[in-house]
Amino acid sequence: MPGSRTLRVETEEWRRLQRAARAGATDSVAGIFADHLDAPVRALLVTTAGERGVWSRLTMVGGQSVIVAQRIASVEGEIRAEPGAQITFTGPDELWRSLARTLPDKELLRAPASAAVEGDRPLALGVDDAQRLLGREECNLCVQVEAWCGGDVPVMVWGRLWSVVEDQLIDVRADGDELRLVERPAGSVAKELRWALTGAVDATTRQEAAG
């Protein structure tokens, strides 16, 4: 599919599309959703900035990707999805651009993979200092990529948590009871996500070849 196409649907239309897909629709938008219900490659991106954010689900089947993005908000301590959804159909060439539009307007998060030319900088901080630094974050992004080949569990799972704090993109890792923080250059999100999605595609291909 050359380029990308985005639809904005309201709540009732979104529910209708979901029902039609689960019923086995074969044409139009619902038919594409039906093809992606059991997509072999899936990713979930959740980004928050203060009390609001965006929940995006990416599925890949062959050379076609579908991104369903819904705005979310914290209401009385609960995360709730706002009405409606934004649906983007895209191919490999436009995939990152389409995903980047769902992220906070921060170049550190939205930059393409080609921008990641600088080195990493580990931050030597104790747990208390690390938590204080993360307490000043402007926004964050949590990503999980999965490869599925039928069955009840994925054959590959990859996850990352990034935080933007004081003009720094920080890769946050838990190492036992410790927090390991690494400052990454702009473009790292796109670069690592591309690597993970490629790995997920390879994992499903190997599994299928093995029978």
Image (tube, rainbow, N blue to C red):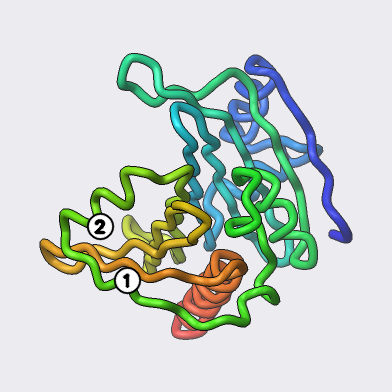
CA distance for labels 1 and 2:
9 Å
* Left or right for 153, reference 23: left
Residue 66, compared with residue 192, is above or below; it is above
Which residue type carries mark 1?
Leu
Point 65% across, 49% down: residue: 35
Q: Mark 2 or mark 1, which is nearer the start of the sequence?
A: 1
Which quadrant of the rendered structure holds the C terminus?
bottom left
**How many numbered dots are placed on residues in this image?**
2
Secondary structure under tag 1 reads strand
Q: Which residue is mark 2?
A: 130
Q: Which residue is mark 1?
A: 123
* Left or right for 1, reference 134: right
Q: How dense is the environment of label 1, judged by Cα within 10 Å: few (below 14), some, or many (20 and up)?
A: few
Q: Nearer the viewer, residue 156 or 184?
A: 184
The answer to which image quadrant residue 110 occupies is: bottom right
Point 87% across, 57% down: residue: 3
